[in-house]
Image: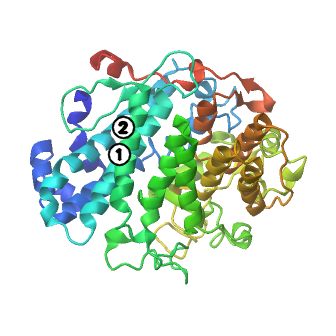
Amino acid sequence: MKKYFFIVIIGLLALGSCKKWLDITPKSQVASDDLFQTEEGFEEALNGVYMRCGQPDLYGGELTFGFLDVMAQNYTLSTIIDPLHYLQTQKFNFKDAYFISRKNNIWDGIYNAIVNVNLILAHIDQQKHIFTGNNYSLIKGEALALRGYLHFDIFRMFGSGPDNAGKKVGIPYVTTYSNKVTVTSSPGDVIKKVLEDLNAAKEMLESVDPIRTSSYIVGYPGGDSSTENASPALFLQNRRNRLNYYAVCGELARVYLYEGDKTDALSNASEVIDSHKFPWTNQADFINIDPATQDRVLYKELIFGWYIPWEAQDLKNRFQSGTAGLYASPSDIQTIYETNGTGGEDLRYKEWFQVGIDGNMLFQKYKRNPNGTEDDPAANLYPLTAPALRLSEMYYIAAECSYDANPAKALDYLNEVRRHRGMGQPLNVSDKNEFINELVKEARKELYGEGQIFYMYKRLNKSITGQSGSLIPAGDNIFIIPMPNDEIEFGKR
């Protein structure tokens, strides 16, 4: 993909993500030769990819808190005031200038990250001798996992869905660092290549990832039980901010389910669940009235999340500014969380939404302690993180994969999540269609503000429930985002 070749180093330089990048000549061949002479250089290059992905145009913004959730109709947008320019995106106006700018930036940003991953992979095998301990397998495993993860998300946005009866749309699957245009892979080939990368990553990480050891205990930073920062090597700390072994299992569960392979999807989701590595959040922490010690994001349940401390002010502006940001009407939130029934006891509804001075609902999931800063470890219970994979999603996948063989077991998975969210009354359904409808409703409640529910609607080819309970019919016109015009023209797509 020629258009990305020349922005590889510039993209990382702009982040200021690591000192070595600032010390080298910004020309790709010279930079890569310098950087990949040391183990630390590979670590810095990999960290640079994570930081690139955490920027506002990708997972530090649009792909978690904005673009995708707007299309999923999670926010109430005024037809008069549109300060963030999302109204036409919510209406699926793919010709709107703001929509085009955002989706083009997402495409460019993710492929920029992929090219940098490929740069790491192009050098790592020939430099295997410079690595100490398990770092060769860790770095290569994470790089492969990132390549699969990023391609899958691009495909879920710009490619056709698995139940799509219309046109079949694939994406370029880029596996080499080159200035040559990569041909477009078919949807089937994209999934095949994603699975190859993720399974190779899983195999590499299985015996070396510190998160799999019994001594690695997930918890809040600085907590008595947490050992996530115990390693003397900084690179081996905080494995949940990286594509660790269990995150790869979780991503494999997603991809296998997308492909329709429920056996392998269930196997991978179960591996995460049965590890008991990610504990359910104590309700006392969820409802704590002290903003410095409240866990709104259900932090210990995160299998993988993007570290984004620089997004604190943007998130405050986005969700705490009333009609100047993103908000929801009381009726829309009451509809989503079904508050007229048992949903009135849902802790997510109670803790994630607050009535603003104008009567609208302000989203609180990412609200930080107003008396502290991100640089102060005592200011908040956990660092600002954009959720990418969480424990509850593994239960949803396990539930969907179990229903045909064991409906009762499937309901057990779903009710387990509900129980931990304050709803003790179990769900009962009469058939699979009703079960899927309930599963989607529960996932929407849980993953609100995380950029995932749009993908679920697309995978199941389900109409999206919009404002005031209206339905937006499923179809190519809402689920397949057009590639950038430049990519179509110069890439001959």
Whether residue 427 sits left or right of residue 480 in the image: it is: right
Say what secondary structure mark 2 lies in.
Answer: helix
Q: Position of residue 486 (x, y in %)?
A: 33, 20
The reply to whether residue 445 is visible in this rendering is: yes
Residue 193's tag is 2
**Do tag 2 and tag 1 residues touch (Cβ < 8 Å)?**
yes
Whether residue 106 sits left or right of residue 208 in the image: it is: right
Which is more toward the observer, 194 or 320? 194
Whether residue 290 sits left or right of residue 476 in the image: it is: right
Say what secondary structure mark 1 lies in.
Answer: helix
Which is more toward the observer, 39 or 251? 251
Relative to 41, say whether 69 is above or below: above
The quadrant of the rendering that contains the C terminus is top left
The residue shown at (15%, 43%) is: 28
The quadrant of the rendering that contains the N terminus is top left
Of all residues, the one furthest to the bottom in this rendering is 224
Q: CA distance from mark 2 to mark 1?
A: 6 Å
The residue shown at (36%, 37%) is: 193
How many marks are shown on the rendered structure?
A: 2
Relative to 368, say whether 123 is above or below: above
Q: Which residue is mark 1?
A: 197
Which is more toward the observer, 367 or 431? 431
> Mark 2: few, some, or many residues within 10 Å (few <14, many ≥20)?
some
Colour treatment of the image: rainbow
The reply to whether residue 320 is visible in this rendering is: no
> Mark 1: few, some, or many residues within 10 Å (few <14, many ≥20)?
many
Q: Position of residue 198 (x, y in %)?
A: 39, 48
Q: Position of residue 465 (x, y in %)?
A: 73, 31
Q: Position of residue 484 (x, y in %)?
A: 39, 23
The amino acid pointed to by label 2 is: Lys
The amino acid pointed to by label 1 is: Asp
Residue 448's tag is none
